[in-house]
């Protein structure tokens, strides 16, 4: 188990770089010549790195940064677009352009990943998030669908979206409480679902732009004419960071969806962001470098330089 903060990033270089978050120093690299990396994720204890790329899922040791993966699975067709881990590291989930969301058992013989379950849809999966209850996966696809996969019942259902066509949801994020799901669209809008239903509202009032598991949300424009790329909720649940193909990252209040701040690192397409454990700082990947920015003041704190090409994915481990 890691005890200090670190981050990992991937680029068209192609390699995975390991960063000392506090010092901004590159501590090592893992070559990845097989293909572009689409997504990165870290286990909850920071010991392993999940890597999703073209037709391949791999797990690397985050402590040794050894070039050879601990586990690998190379049977999936097309790109892996999303992945993450169950809280205790018993299994991982993926989504991809093969139009499936999959569960991989990580407790096997230590030589390979075994696909334990699969949920098939009709379009490529864009994003997948795990509910804090560890029993529900929410995912979205390029065909305009958003789904809830109940792992206990083995069934999946559509969440209502209303009239957002020709938009589709590109990325999802879930509130730490598990009460709210957020999504962003291909036309720069944000949507929100109250997963608790009407009974989950603290004061019974409607919330701007909100839907539920049975009611369609109202999309709220954020980036007119820009493609929204990533959506992250802060650990304290108060803020949402949304990036896009514009040169800004918007910081929203998670209750009101009002813009609290705009961050910029001088990059155009910003593929991903990650909050610090105290929710006061945001790691932003843009062009060929990462930047740690103060969320409230937009002040750049640390620049992480080392990649030679645009960054495609990042993840941060920042223990309390």
Image: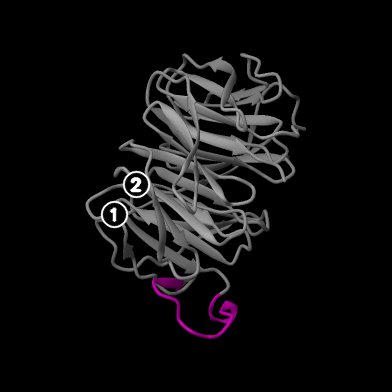
* Residue count near mark 1 (Cα–Cα under 10 Å), binned few <14, some 14–19, many ≥20: many
Which residue does the numbered mark 2 point to in the structure image? 248
Q: Quadrant of the N terminus?
A: top right
- On residue 260, the disc is none
- Mark 2 or mark 1, which is nearer to you? 2
Q: Are marks 2 and 1 in contact (CB under 8 Å)?
A: yes
Residue 78 seen from this side: no
- On residue 223, the disc is 1
Asked whether 113 or 233 is in front, the reply is: 233
Q: Position of residue 262 (x, y in %)?
A: 38, 52
Find the magenta span and give its range.
197-211
Residue at far left of view = 225
CA distance for labels 2 and 1: 9 Å
Residue 312 seen from this side: yes
Is residue 189 covered in magenta? no
* Residue count near mark 2 (Cα–Cα under 10 Å), binned few <14, some 14–19, many ≥20: many
Which residue is pictured at 63% across the width and 51% down the height? 278
Which residue is pictured at 53% across the width and 80% down the height? 198
SS category of the residue bearing label 1: loop
Which residue is pictured at 71% across the width and 33% down the height? 4
Number of dots carrying numbers = 2
Q: Is residue 109 left or right of residue 115?
A: right
């Amino acid at each position: 188990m890691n005890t200090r903060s670190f981050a990992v990033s991937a680029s068209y270089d192609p390699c995975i770089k390991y960063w000392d978050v506090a010092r901004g120093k590159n501590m090592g690299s893992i070559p990845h010549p097989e293909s572009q990396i689409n997504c990165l994720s870290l286990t909850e204890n920071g010991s392993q790195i999940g890597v999703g790329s073209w037709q391949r899922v791999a797990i690397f040791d985050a402590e040794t940064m050894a070039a050879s993966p601990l586990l690998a699975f190379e049977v999936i067709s097309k790109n892996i677009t999303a992945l993450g881990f169950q809280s205790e590291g018993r299994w991982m989930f993926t989504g991809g352009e093969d139009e499936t969301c999959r569960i991989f058992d990580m407790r096997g013989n230590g030589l390979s990943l075994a696909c334990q379950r699969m949920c098939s849809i009709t379009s490529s999966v864009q994003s997948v998030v795990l509910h804090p209850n560890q029993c529900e996966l929410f995912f979205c696809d390029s065909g305009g669908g958003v789904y809830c996969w109940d792992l206990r019942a083995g069934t999946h259902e559509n969440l209502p979206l209303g009239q957002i066509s020709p938009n589709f949801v590109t990325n999802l994020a879930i509130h730490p409480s598990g009460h709210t799901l957020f999504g962003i669209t291909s036309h720069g809008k944000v949507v929100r679902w109250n997963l608790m239903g009407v009974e989950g509202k603290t004061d019974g009032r409607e919330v701007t732009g909100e839907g539920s598991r049975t009611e369609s949300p109202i999309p709220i424009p954020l980036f007119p004419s820009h493609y929204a790329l990533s959506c992250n909720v802060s650990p304290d649940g108060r803020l949402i960071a949304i990036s896009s193909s514009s040169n800004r990252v918007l910081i929203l209040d998670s209750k009101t969806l009002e813009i609290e701040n705009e961050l910029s690192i001088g990059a155009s397409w910003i593929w991903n962001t990650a909050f610090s454990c105290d929710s006061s700082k945001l790691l932003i990947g843009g062009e060929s470098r990462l930047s740690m920015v103060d969320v409230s003041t937009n002040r750049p704190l640390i620049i992480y330089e080392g990649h030679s090409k645009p960054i495609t994915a990042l993840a941060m481990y920042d223990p309390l």
